[in-house]
Amino acid sequence: MSTHSHGHAEDSHAGHDHHDHEHHDTFWTKYVFSQDHKMISKQFLVTAIIMALLAMFMSLIFRLQLGWPSEKFPFLESILGHWGKDGKLDPNFYLALVTIHGTIMVFFVLTGGLSGTFSNLLIPFQVGARDMASGFLNMLSYWFFFGSCAVMTASLFVQAGPASAGWTIYPPLSALPQAIPGSGLGMTLWLVSMVLFIGSALLGGINYVVTILNLRTKGMSMTRLPLTIWAFLITAILGILSFPVLFAAALLLLFDRSFGTSFYLSDIFINGAPLAHSGGSPILFQHLFWFLGHPEVYIVLLPALGLASEVISTQSRKPIFGYKAMIGSMLVIAFLSFIVWGHHMFITGMNPFLGSVFVFTTLLVAIPSAVKVFNYLATLWRANIVLSPAMLFAIGLVSFFISGGLTGIILGDSALDINIHDTYFVVAHFHIVMGSSAIFGMFAGIYHWFPRMFGRMMNKRAGYIHFWLTIVGVYGTFFPMHFIGLSGAPRRYYAYTAYEGFDAALNINALVSVFAILGGLAQLIFVFNFFYSMYRGKKAAQNPWGSTTLEWTAPVEHLHGNWPGEIPTVYRWPYDYGKPGADEDFIQQTVPYSETPKSNLPGEA
Amino acid sequence: MIKLLTLIVIALAAVTIWRLMRVLELVRDLRNEDEQITDKDNRVNGRLMLWFLVLGMGGMTYFTIDAKKYLLPVAASKHGALTDSYLYINFALIIVVFFITQILLFYFAWKYQHKKGQKAFFYPVDHKLEFIWTIIPAVVLMGLIVYGLKLWINITAPAPKEAMVIEVYGKQFDWTARYSGGDNTLGRSNFKLITDDNQLGVDSLDENGKDDKITRELHLPVGSKVIFKFHSRDVLHSAYFPHLRAQMNCVPGMTTEFFVEPTITTDSMRLITGNPKFDYVLLCNKICGVAHYNMRMKMVIEPADDFKKWYKTQPYVFARPDAAPAVVPADTVKTAQASAQNRKIVASK
């Protein structure tokens, strides 16, 4: 809260300079129940950073267990109580940690945090709107998100432990408290939290789509939208189409748990007694879950790619290569993402023919992905690259997108998936392609648009240190993990000591943990830089990166309505960087062609 | 005491980073910078890009060569040998693409770093290039898809009739195997018939079950054809045979199956791996509860003669009149009653 009150003093000071500003916000309407997209985006970001720290801390705890399974860490008892008795992590709590780590990272950080922050910040700014279509729904979206985070965090304090069936919460494990203690109250809270989260995602998503389609400023045709906006639009549509399915899946699970229905349960004998459930199928849940779950991967990834596209083009001082191909490939990826969910289920006993259809659609995803990578490389070719911290993170994203995407070709092939399904190979794959890519996109976004959010610059040296430690940490953590998987070691194992075939898991895991801890510590530098720069960062210029897009034509101070006078009109596409004949190496979207006769290409009158 | 120490360590870490931020801030102010990216920033980070590329690639190559010793030994099943060679084709392809694209990425980042007064090459689109790098991945992937699907169709084809039927039964937190005996047909089973001495709930009225045998180790004759039928009684499990390159989920209320032809005996594999204590293993590979990480069963692949010898020593599901009378435990009467009770439930269904 101290952060907020300080910001308050500053902003109200700024408010005095604008005497035409008629709103008199109280603390509550300005910082808590704000309907302003800029404030809501900051709320999303700060909440996501706190959740991310929590989830990262959890991962470090279980990395200690995995890296040094026979050591004792007495401090665990002091922070975890009976879950860390005598310095040993409880195996049940280990499962709870991996579950909640995954849930927080996938949903709260990379979905809510990423889309919530940057869709809110950039959509009105970049399409040229005063605010979101509905400020009220937008506020509601944040508070649903906040509620969801609060319930999930509260579930950590349940006596029997939080949900522990893995972030995919497959029943029957997640349905039966007899099967695992976390499937009691902890699981109920998980489901409640997720219902709130889905509410938030839908409210936000509808708002984003409506704003992009209806509130574009004069001249802002769809093909003049920055790629960020295209990414947010496609992401929002994916969310609107897929989240309700997760809602249905969660609801049916809730019925099975609480009201004795049998959607997912049948023929179960547990704890010495047969259960009455009959006729359901646990596989049904997986179909429903992954019908959301796979688009979810792209809900996480597309905004990151959008942010990276914008940063790469801006800092390359060069138009993004193949603007329309970039949009096209995002649309194709989004479409395909709805018909590939079965590749998570090759070995559930599904009909082999159905499996082959999913192999086909899955491997098709590699084509638009390859196009995107080649377009990024072509953008960097003969560019004039400014290596800002944001640019470094964007380049890191492309590197991860390649590395993780390539192993996806193996996992998407059913014949190969048989052997590596649910091993550490999968863990390595998705942490690189989805986790690290997306978080690097988010970092790129934060470093790049920090001046737009807070009117100050982040410290670039701390940014550089953060980047280099993080990329080393990420590759050091997740590259060796592939080999743990290829040695046949399953994921979600508490220890690999019981069977001698797990030598790899034992030896490599220690190395992995060292890099994970290094990477984790590096994030503290970021967190300090972030909060420190909010108050003590250098004051930002209006357009610090020399960008073409609309958000940098608005004054540094945050105004209600974004622009003091009329909303600017747009005359050109967003990537006129390095145009031959132009005076500077960028031309803003608000500059008409009539003012730039020397640089106009044929057809641009 | 430990609590206090933990707190102190955390506090010290926070102070350290706080001071670091302050130092960076002072450096910035001393040099009178405004956080704009300077030529020096570009130069330093550009060089780091190259160093990262070289050291990263070197480190990964070194690690890969070193970690070869951890990889699974040669596949011990017929289809496994095929999928392994397909896996290597995939890896070869991936490594080539990986090296080319990563080298270009980091090299460009260094090579084309910002120079004042210079402009980037204005190159917004080239349809020919776009076409080329859409078509090439498409063609390569089509090749992979066709190859992969051929394998997949082979692996999942219906098992031949003579394949030995073995049930692999998962429950929290162990595995049991049931061999189908001379008739090669498993007796009916029902979860409601489960009792302490009928752990799989086999129906004693089904003639097919009379010759079924239950074992706590999985033995397979080398060179045979085996069809596994998977069951679970409580939550999802996944029967993972890393050395056979085989895996299938065990789903309560549903039977799944996987056909394998084991090709290498345990003894041969001990020679191949140079590890005299090597044993095949069946692991659980679907999170199933607190002891998930300990749920496994020893598997032995052996010559047919040895298999027959071992098989003879294994008990039938139900004691048979021709078999030696087993010692009757005291609580048998109770479980027999429970069994009768459950049978009524099943019958009334």
Image (cartoon, coloured by chain):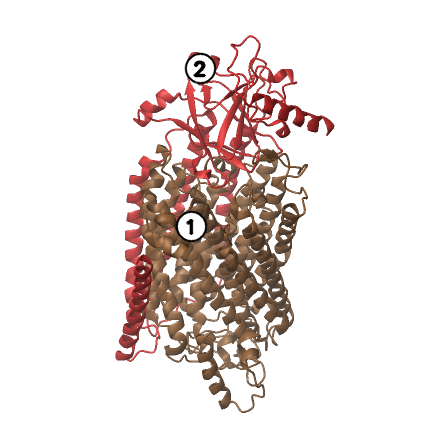
Chain colours: A brown, B red
Q: Secondary structure at mark 2?
A: helix
Residue A83: which disc? 1
Q: Amino acid at mark 1?
A: Trp
| Chain letter for the residue marked with disc 2 in the picture | B
- Tell me which residue sits at (48%, 22%) in the image: B261
Q: How many marks?
A: 2
Q: Would residue A125 be seen by someone viewing this image from the given angle?
A: no
Density class for disc 2 (Cα within 10 Å; few <14, some 14-19, many ≥20) is few
| Chain letter for the residue marked with disc 1 in the picture | A
Q: Amino acid at mark 2?
A: Trp
Q: Nearer the viewer, residue B120 or B290?
A: B290
Question: Real-space Cα distance between discs 1 and 2?
Answer: 44 Å
Q: Is residue A112 left or right of residue B72?
A: right
The quadrant in which residue A449 appears is bottom left
- Tell me which residue sits at (46%, 14%) in the image: B313
Q: At which x and y percent is residue B308?
A: 46, 12
The quadrant in which residue A346 appears is top right
Q: At which x and y percent is residue A95?
A: 46, 47
Q: Residue furthest front?
A: B330
Which residue in the protein does label 2 denote?
B310
Q: Would residue A576 be seen by someone viewing this image from the given angle?
A: yes
The quarter of the image holding the C terminus of chain B is top right
The answer to the question of whether label 1 and label 2 lie on touching residues, with beta carbons closer than 8 A, is no
Q: Secondary structure at mark 1?
A: helix
Q: Nearer the viewer, residue B163 or A90?
A: A90
